[in-house]
Image: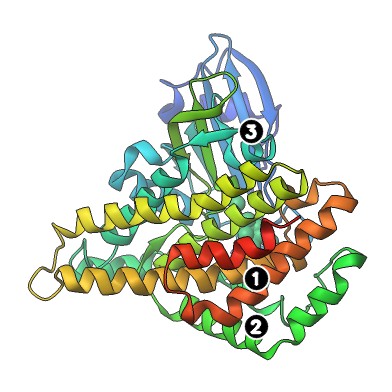
Amino acid sequence: MSHEYTFLDADNIGEYLRSRPETHDRIDADRIASVREIGDGNLNLVFHVLDEDGRGIILKQSLPYVRMTGAGWPMTPERAAREADSLQTHHALTPELVVEVILYDPERYILALEDLSDHAVWRDALNRSERHEEVARRVGTYVAALAVGTSILGQDRGLISQRIAETQNPELCTITEDLVFTEPVFDAGRNEVLPDNATDAAALAADPAFAAAMAEAKWRFMTQAEALIHGDLHTGSIMVRSASESADGAVADSVKVFDSEFAFYGPIAFDLGALFANYSFAAARATALGEHERAAWALGLVAETWDGFEREFVARSESWHETRLFGAAFAQRRLARIRQEAFLFAAAKMARRIVGAAKVRDIESLEPALRAPAARGVLVAARALAAAWEGVNDIAEFETLVGAQVLSS
Ligand code: SR1
Ligand code: MG
């Protein structure tokens, strides 16, 4: 496969938009007022383009390598196709919660997306100590919509087989398998921690219970083709907008999930575990900053997401495609299993963001004197959770176990 294609830049974006009629009712390509590169993720180029009437569009282009490290880590740009497909599939199921795709260009691996510049990335908002209420619940609703709508519960057998084939995403899955499950145990030379966290990171890697849990998690990730999951559902993959200026305690009037290039048919609990882990980062950060009430609020988002997920899963189960055998009791058993697996995946996600190559600003942007204890709280919680996940029976027990580490200063 050739990777010779022209990268977008401020000088060629006008010409590109002029050549794409799908964008012409969104932006006037002859009157471009500004082009800003806003990508802050690990992988892609992202531009916010505005015309002279103030109408905007987002252009996102996959590079043939990992942006975080440069050309030394090649990565298929076909991930843009996976993102376009999954965003469109998810948008059809729950349009109010997923960014709209305006076009996908398979020759240059470009997505044009609706302009969400009046929204904030939820991680950034959390890091500014803002509280946007009801986001966590609605994200739980989103996960349930995918869990039912793209699974055997929402589609017939033939279509599921076809979709599993069409949505294979081996390169991106390999990144997850390496960075999330393997490397916290076996460093491939990419791990790094503060000197004050080195003892805890070494103890984690040497703990047979942690290694056994990561093996279990990786196996489930690689074998359980349950639904077309997002695959990287952290708080940086969610945009929020609240009507109130301060946004302190304001109910979000818009929540949009984006950035699903890691999508594939995988375990539903993986998306939930990612969210639970990210709430623990927000809680650890708030604790480090002495914002104890906010820390408890952040960890409480776990219960809110689960509640949103459970309600929507049950509501959608009323119209399950296969109703003869898959009844209410089956739905309850599925929920119990998904919840427990979410705890396992949360442990993996917590550990990887502290010891691994791709870290989170919630912790990294703290000054070192605060960062080390915050990182330690997450790391020790991850290890305790990995040892106990099969015996953690409900969300309250999860919050108690993780809170014992991330809520104590
Ligand atoms: C090389 S990509 C590193 C990480 O960034 C993404 O957000 C995924 O979480 C991936 O593991
Ligand atoms: Mg991303």
The residue lying furthest to the top in this view is 53
Looking at the rendered structure, the secondary structure element under dot 1 is helix
Left or right: 11 in relation to 214: right
Looking at the rendered structure, the secondary structure element under dot 3 is strand
Instruction: Identify the disc placed on residue 73.
Output: none
Asked whether the residues under the numbered discs 2 and 1 touch, taking CB atoms below 8 Å apart as contact, a structural biologist would say: yes
Residue 3 % position (x, y): 64, 57
Earlier-in-chain disc, 2 versus 1: 2
> What residue is rendered at 85% in x and 68% in y?
197
The residue indicated by pointer 1 is: 382
Query: Which of the 4 quarters of the picture holds residue 48?
Result: top right
Above-or-below relation of 195 to 214 = above
> What residue is rendered at 27% in x and 57% in y?
313
Quadrant in the picture for the N terminus: bottom right
Q: CA distance from mark 2 to mark 1?
A: 9 Å
Left or right: 96 in relation to 123: left
Amino acid type of the residue that numbered disc 3 sits on in the rendered structure? Phe
Numbered marks: total = 3
Looking at the rendered structure, the secondary structure element under dot 2 is helix
The residue indicated by pointer 3 is: 47
Cβ of disc 2 within 8 Å of ligand 1?
Answer: no
The residue indicated by pointer 2 is: 210
Amino acid type of the residue that numbered disc 1 sits on in the rendered structure? Ala
Asked whether the residues under the numbered discs 1 and 3 touch, taking CB atoms below 8 Å apart as contact, a structural biologist would say: no
Above-or-below relation of 242 to 82 = above
In the foreground, 238 or 22: 238
Quadrant in the picture for the C terminus: bottom right
Mark 2 neighbour class, 10 Å CA radius: few under 14, some 14 to 19, many 20 or more: many
